Amino acid sequence: MTPRQSILKFLYPFITLFSGFFKNGVSQNKENIQPISSFYSLSSTLNNGESFSFDSLRGYKVLIVNTASNCGLTTQYEELEKLYQQHKDKLKIIAFPANNFKEQEKGSDEDIATFCKLNYGVSFMLMQKMNVIGTNQNGVFKWLTNKDSNGWCNQQPQWNFSKYLIDENGILQNYFAPSVSPLSKKIVGKITQ
């Protein structure tokens, strides 16, 4: 961990507390609107270069998070791993490293995997680094952020560690802002219901 990353880890509780004052941070699919195109038709590329079909996620709740190694919220990797270990019988977590916000993910895919494993013990899925916003937006994030695909949500990631929760039937149920901790009652309550 670099000195910058150590400082950011120390400041994390203050960053989340401060950012929590400004937004509720949760959007919800209150009417259980079905997606226009199937979540299970999506695919992406794992950190190791292998293709991954989302069809294998049927029957699981899925939390998709855009991540970065040099962000004030990077400590959420630790919280995500804890959440995954507590609920991995019914939950899959997929991290999408991205360098879209202030160039806070400059490392290679190998560097990112090493950083996550060494510093946070990450055992959930890491995808290859890609764009989560903009003209070259990854297909998964196009689905997550376009109501013409997912049925209701147009919310782009606001920053690193934006979170999208898909239920075990492939329905996008929630968007959680970066300031919402993965271990918050808001997220854990949705996973355990």
Image (cartoon, grey):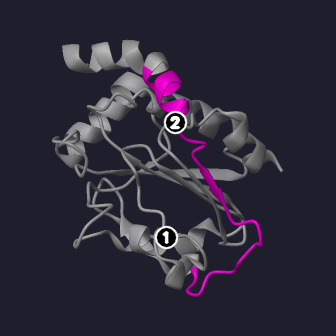
Q: Quadrant of residue 37?
A: bottom right
Q: Main secondary structure of the magenta part?
A: loop
Q: Is residue 117 visible?
A: yes
The residue that label 2 is drawn on is 22
Distance in Å between CA atoms under marks 2 and 1? 20 Å
Q: Quadrant of residue 23?
A: top right
Q: Quadrant of the N terminus?
A: top left
Q: Is residue 2 visible?
A: no
Q: For numbered disc 1, what is the local secondary structure?
A: loop
Closer to us: 26 or 9: 26
The residue that label 1 is drawn on is 154
Residue at image coords 77%, 72%: 31
Please give left or right for residue 15 compared with residue 189 in the image.
Answer: left
Residue at image coords 25%, 67%: 134
Q: Position of residue 116 (x, y in %)?
A: 36, 33
- 150 up-or-down from 102: above or below: below
- 186 up-or-down from 17: above or below: below
Q: Position of residue 15 (x, y in %)?
A: 43, 23
How would you rate the neighbour count of disc 2 (Cα within 10 Å): few for under 14, some for 14-19, many for 20 or more? Answer: few
Please give left or right for residue 70 compared with residue 176 in the image.
Answer: left
Q: Position of residue 50 (x, y in %)?
A: 33, 64
The answer to whether residue 174 is magenta is: no
- 81 up-or-down from 145: above or below: above
Amino acid tagged 2? Phe
Q: Earlier in the sequence, mark 2 or mark 1?
A: 2
Residue at image coords 27%, 40%: 112
Q: For numbered disc 2, what is the local secondary structure?
A: loop
Q: Over which residues does the magenta segment extend?
A: 15-38
- 29 up-or-down from 36: above or below: above
How would you rate the neighbour count of disc 1 (Cα within 10 Å): few for under 14, some for 14-19, many for 20 or more? Answer: some
Amino acid tagged 1? Asn
